[in-house]
Image: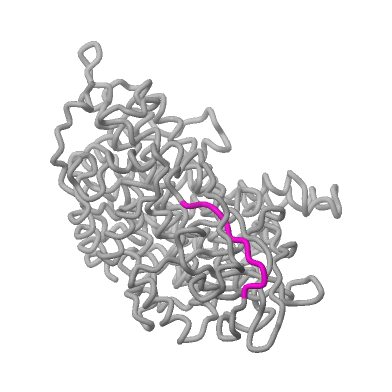
Amino acid sequence: MSKADLTALAAQLEEYLGDPHDAGSRMSFTRVLDHDEHEEYPYAFVSQLRRWGVHEYSLPAEQGGRAGNVETGFNLMRLVGRRDATTATALVITNLSFMPLWIAGSDEQKRSAVEDMKRGGGLSWGLSERDHGSDLLANEMVAEKTDGGYLLTGEKWLIGNATVADTMVVFARTGKRNGPAAYSIFIVDKRQIPAITAEELPVEKLHGLRALDLSGLRLKGAFVPDSARVGAEGQGLEIALKSTQLARTVISSLAMSAVDTGLRLTLDFTEGRVLLGTAVSDVPYSRRQLTEAFADLMVADAVSLGAVRSLQAAPEQLSVWSSVVKYLLPTLLEKTMSQLNMVLGARFFLRDHPHYGPYQKMLRDLLVANIADGNTVVNLRNLGQQLDGLLASAGGAAPAVREAAAERAATLFGMDRELPVYEPWKQELFSRGQDDAMLAAPDGLSRLRALAEEAKGTERDRLLRAADEAEELLDRVGPLTDRAAELKAELGREYAQSAELFELSKEYCLLHATAACVLTYVHSHGVLDDPLPSGALLLLQIERLRRHLYPHESVTDPSVIDEVMRVLRHLHRENRLFSHWQFPLAERVADLTAARL
């Protein structure tokens, strides 16, 4: 889908849902907060979004869905999530639960599931268990072979949609001996099994996403036919891990949506509130806080752009891209939201404020992006296992390898570039040292300097400074490689599980993000809408990444902050998403008097 077509589709969804501050809109903050306060599942919101067809943009067109590009569904969910992360999560869970079928299911299984989902049916993904968490090879649910099918016994817990969905896709042991080939995946239709063999577990009370169905399912000898098995017997672990890669990539939309709303609400206050004769937005310290939060969000936007498009353009590298985005974005944006807390002040703590009530909900809901579908530890461990190969490739790849990566990067970070068909079965569990963002970074820097030479005045200077600062960060590949080698020699076998390796993986994520910001600029600058592209914003993005390593050093001056504030104000006043996409949002029709109280 072209950028223009996706923008038009996003505008249609926004018009359908209406101004969230308008109590009479289809998905108003007033109703969202009421569901949250009473911990009531948002059936009405889910139903009306299904009627519109939002979930169909994450289902394969070959079997009756509307999915062409993954980023279409990803971005539509951002628009839902900016109103209510709970509703977005409920829909995302259904779509992610379909992934095992998309990867390895038969055409009949896919068509049947898509038809059921289009009729309003939900799905849940029965992967985790109470005693084992992310240790999939310790899972205890058993699928015992019997005539014509299997008998499933065991418990799945902390499962989204486990109670409200009629169907659960279940990961269960089929092998006699434990190991990677001991597990398989099954479709369990609760409407088709004897009532006595299934029991839903209580819905858990949550800190955030209070209205979400997060519960579980206990099975005891539940019969499912052979036709309910997804893929071959023993293929379950591979299917599950590939499904998780997509989940880790798209879950970042929830964090980005929360910060978009948080920043928008904060600006409603700072633009209208006058203290000592000056708008809060124009107080130098507040202005820097606001622009830094915006830059953080735009870093996340650039990283997610490449990661989501890698699902189609570089599926063999997804083990790296998904782990980078799943670690970096939630941890980055949690800090961003905390920074906004200081600007908004006491209002962020008020649950019933007529305008700022949604802020505290976004603050709580944001946290789920860190723990769902693989937490920080899981993702850093995954990167650590591949770090040697990634660093070797980033520091010493042959020219031909870099050239090929640069060609792919034009698609990964070119917002209007056509993507290949999504074929999730092509995903790999290890990248073999390939990370196109890092491999294409030198080409990106060369292109950025060429664009700088074509620019004039301060824009030329800012782009050149951004290139220099980005290159300095990316040059850390060499020292990072040396530190890894020294630690490996010092720690021996302990290196693979060491805290030091986790820290190296964190730094690698910062370098990947730096490359993503540069590559987004150089490959999408020609299709961005005013007031983008902005050299000042790019420089501030690089500074924000640099601050993780040099927390007290700045590379921007007040003029850069002023320019970034101009960009931010433009997007706020024109009511557009804080993103490179700049989707037009629903017209603001509600009275904003309460925003100044």
- Residue 332 relative to residue 62: left or right: right
Q: For the magenta stretch, what is the residue range? A: 213-222
Instruction: Give residue 39's quadrant in the image.
Output: top left
Residue positioned 39% across, 33% down in the render = 360
- The quadrant of the picture occupied by the N terminus is bottom left
Q: Is residue 246 above or below residue 554?
A: below
Q: Is residue 581 above or below residue 187?
A: above
Q: Position of residue 337 (x, y in %)?
A: 43, 35
In the image, 86 versus 194, the foreground residue is: 194
Q: Is residue 90 above or below residue 69?
A: above
Q: Is residue 464 above or below residue 312?
A: above
Residue 512 in view in this figure? yes
Q: Main secondary structure of the magenta part?
A: strand
Residue positioned 66% across, 57% down in the render = 129
Residue positioned 52% across, 42% down in the render = 205
Residue 536 in view in this figure? no
Q: Position of residue 579 (x, y in %)?
A: 32, 50
Q: Residue furthest front?
A: 196
Is residue 216 within the magenta segment?
Answer: yes
Q: Position of residue 424 (x, y in %)?
A: 50, 75
In the image, 408 versus 177, the foreground residue is: 177
In the image, 378 versus 150, the foreground residue is: 150
Is residue 544 within the magenta segment?
Answer: no
- The quadrant of the picture occupied by the C terminus is top left
Q: Position of residue 336 (x, y in %)?
A: 44, 36
- Residue 367 relative to residue 91: left or right: right
Number of dots carrying numbers:
0
